[in-house]
């Protein structure tokens, strides 16, 4: 029975649920990007290059067909997905984490001597390096 409880605790942890949601959204996003590439970008590039559909591009060697056009479409899809993830997920999260890491300024425990620029304690009345006297 404890094995079942451990499995239940594992499944209900936040990381597993978040990962499952991310996978589902990623699959849905991939289908949108694939449609964008197949329906908009490929015809746009084909208008410039003259080939109406990249997925139809192939090479036949010894009755084996190599679909390099389909591979090209998949590379374009991957590039778009990678760019979107980088610019809309990674960059904002990195900047958010950098802002969260900033520590509040620490109260200074020392000051610089105006004559020799050495670090001296705040309560010092004389610099230990150049013997300059300070007002109390």
Image (spheres, rainbow, N blue to C red):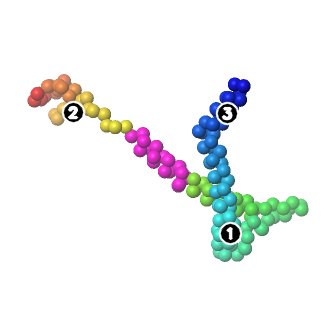
Residue 101 sits in quarter:
top left
User: Residue 15, percent across and down?
Assistant: 60, 39
Residue indicated by mark 3: 8
Q: CA distance from mark 1 to mark 3?
A: 43 Å
Q: Viewed as shown, does residue 47 lie left or right of 134?
A: right
Residue that appears at 87% across and 60% down: 64
Is residue 124 found left or right of 70 in the rendered image?
left
Query: Tag 3 or tag 2, which sits nearer the N-term?
Result: 3
Q: Quadrant of residue 45?
A: bottom right
Q: Which residue is mark 1?
A: 39
User: With respect to residue 52, does 32 lie above or below?
Assistant: above
Is residue 76 among the parts visible in the rendering? no
* Highlighted range, magenta: 86-102
Residue 74 x %, y %: 70, 59
Q: Position of residue 116 (x, y in %)?
A: 19, 32
Measuring from the top left, give residue 43's x and y in whole percent.
Answer: 68, 72
Q: Tell me the SS state at disc 3.
A: helix
For the C terminus, the image quarter is: top left
Examine the residues drawn in magenta and state their main secondary structure.
Answer: helix
Asked if residue 7 lies in the magenta stretch, the reply is no
Q: Nearer the viewer, residue 22 or 79?
A: 22
- The answer to whether residue 112 is above or below residue 86 is above
Answer whether residue 8 is visible to the viewer in this image.
yes
Judged from this view, the residue extending furthest toward the left is: 135
**Camera-side mark, 2 or 1:** 1
Disc 1 crowd, CA 10 A, few/some/many (<14, 14-19, 20+): few
Q: Which mark is residue 112?
A: 2
- Secondary structure beneath disc 1? helix
Q: Which type of secondary structure does the marked residue at label 2 adopt?
A: strand
Gap between marks 2 and 1 measured at Cα: 66 Å
Discs 1/3, front? 3
Q: Residue at x 65, y 65 (%)?
A: 36
């Amino acid at each position: 029975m404890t094995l079942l409880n451990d499995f239940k605790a594992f499944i209900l942890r936040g990381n597993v649920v978040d990962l499952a949601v991310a996978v589902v959204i990623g699959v849905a996003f991939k289908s949108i990007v694939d449609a964008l590439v197949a329906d908009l970008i490929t015809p746009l590039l084909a208008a410039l290059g003259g080939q109406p559909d990249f997925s139809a591009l192939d090479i036949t060697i010894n009755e084996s067909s190599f679909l390099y056009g389909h591979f090209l479409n998949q590379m374009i899809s991957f590039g778009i997905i990678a760019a979107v993830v980088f610019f809309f997920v990674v960059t904002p999260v990195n900047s958010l984490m950098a802002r969260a890491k900033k520590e509040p300024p620490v109260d200074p425990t020392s000051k610089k001597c105006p004559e020799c620029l050495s670090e001296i304690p705040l309560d010092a009345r004389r610099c230990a390096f150049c013997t300059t006297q300070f007002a109390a």
